[in-house]
Image (spheres, rainbow, N blue to C red):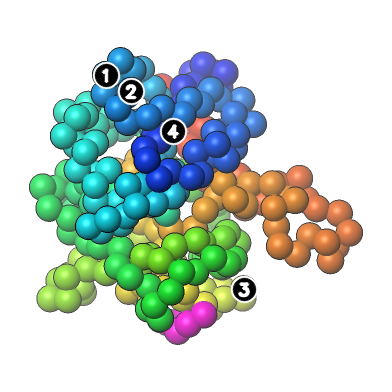
């Protein structure tokens, strides 16, 4: 498939606030991107018309109940069968920040046994408590399964900003080690928080900005086609977005966030 033929759906709902930036990041790579409200998607724009799906950041429906929970359940109620077919066709799905929360609440991540009826993980209130909006360093852990990070070498440290109050990735306490081992064995662990040298945060603030278990910043499903992360690649796509470019006198053309979108687009061109 040619890049110019690729159609990406960027899902919008009440409270979404990063859809325009996400759309631009995709379109600058030559693909077509449409911001579609979840209700319109259910009524008149079939999900299967699209080649990739993105749940962008924001605070969908005010993050009432739990972050991402209302949109996740609403999406499943209206488009559950279509979403399952999308996953089965191995079309890529990307969840950014609130999108990551949605994918977890929808049972798509970690997805050890496919879509689960109940969430197997959670993105809980930050510890220390508070809204975090700053740049973070994350280390790429994936050995090649995640199709949405194919352009990033294993072990590379990339820089992206976070903006969330509920980004602390956790498993049920009694299943922590078992589920962590599954992530590692299945090559589902994608990003971990670290310092700028690549040393893992080991749960320590501020390198780990939210208290995430095992410094987890992003994971994929077992097939590597569904990927969620808390940092925002669309806010690190261009050099002028970087926090320190003025110290060098001239910004680079792109930031590390571009690698996420480029990996997604490249996968679609090769796969379909």
Query: Hey, which quadrant is residue 219 in on the image?
Result: bottom left
Query: Mark 1 or mark 3, which is nearer the start of the sequence?
Result: 1
Which label belongs to residue 10? 4
* Picture quarter with the C terminus: top left
Q: Are marks 1 and 4 in contact (CB under 8 Å)?
A: no
Q: Are marks 4 and 2 in contact (CB under 8 Å)?
A: no
The correct choice, above or below, for 32 with respect to 157 in the image is above
Query: Mark 2 or mark 4, which is nearer the start of the sequence?
Result: 4
Near mark 2 (Cα within 10 A), the count class, few <14, some 14-19 or many ≥20, is: few
Which label belongs to residue 43? 1
Near mark 4 (Cα within 10 A), the count class, few <14, some 14-19 or many ≥20, is: many
Q: Nearer the viewer, residue 132 or 65?
A: 65
Q: Position of residue 142 (x, y in %)?
A: 42, 57
**In magenta segment, residue 212:** no
The reply to whether residue 110 is visible in this rendering is no
Query: Mark 4 or mark 3, which is nearer the start of the sequence?
Result: 4
Q: In this picture, which residue range is highlighted in magenta?
A: 200-206
Q: Nearer the viewer, residue 220 or 151?
A: 220
Q: Position of residue 122 (x, y in %)?
A: 25, 62
Q: Nearer the viewer, residue 47 or 73?
A: 73
């Amino acid at each position: 498939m040619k890049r110019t033929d690729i159609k990406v759906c960027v899902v919008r709902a009440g409270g979404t606030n990063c859809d325009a930036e996400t759309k631009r990041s995709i379109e600058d790579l030559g693909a077509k991107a449409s911001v579609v409200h979840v209700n319109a998607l259910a009524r008149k724009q079939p999900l299967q018309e699209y080649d990739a799906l993105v749940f962008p950041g924001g605070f969908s429906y005010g993050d009432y109940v739990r972050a991402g929970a209302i949109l996740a359940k609403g999406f499943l109620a209206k488009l559950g069968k279509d979403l399952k077919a999308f996953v089965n066709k191995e079309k890529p799905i990307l969840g950014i920040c609130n999108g990551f929360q949605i994918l977890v609440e929808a049972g798509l991540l970690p997805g050890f046994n496919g879509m689960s009826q109940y969430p197997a993980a959670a993105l809980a209130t930050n510890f220390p408590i508070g809204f975090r909006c700053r740049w973070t360093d994350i280390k790429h852990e994936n050995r090649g399964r995640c199709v949405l990070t194919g352009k990033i070498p294993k072990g590379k440290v990339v820089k992206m900003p976070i903006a969330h109050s509920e980004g602390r990735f956790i498993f049920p306490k009694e299943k922590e080690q078992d589920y962590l081992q599954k992530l590692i064995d299945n090559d589902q662990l994608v990003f971990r928080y670290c310092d700028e040298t690549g040393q893992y945060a080991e749960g320590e603030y501020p390198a780990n900005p939210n208290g995430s278990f095992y410094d987890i910043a992003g994971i994929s499903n077992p097939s590597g086609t569904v990927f969620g992360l808390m940092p925002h690649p669309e806010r690190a796509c261009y050099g002028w977005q970087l926090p320190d470019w003025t110290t060098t006198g001239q910004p680079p053309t792109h930031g590390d966030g571009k690698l996420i979108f480029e990996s997604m687009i490249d996968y679609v061109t090769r796969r379909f």
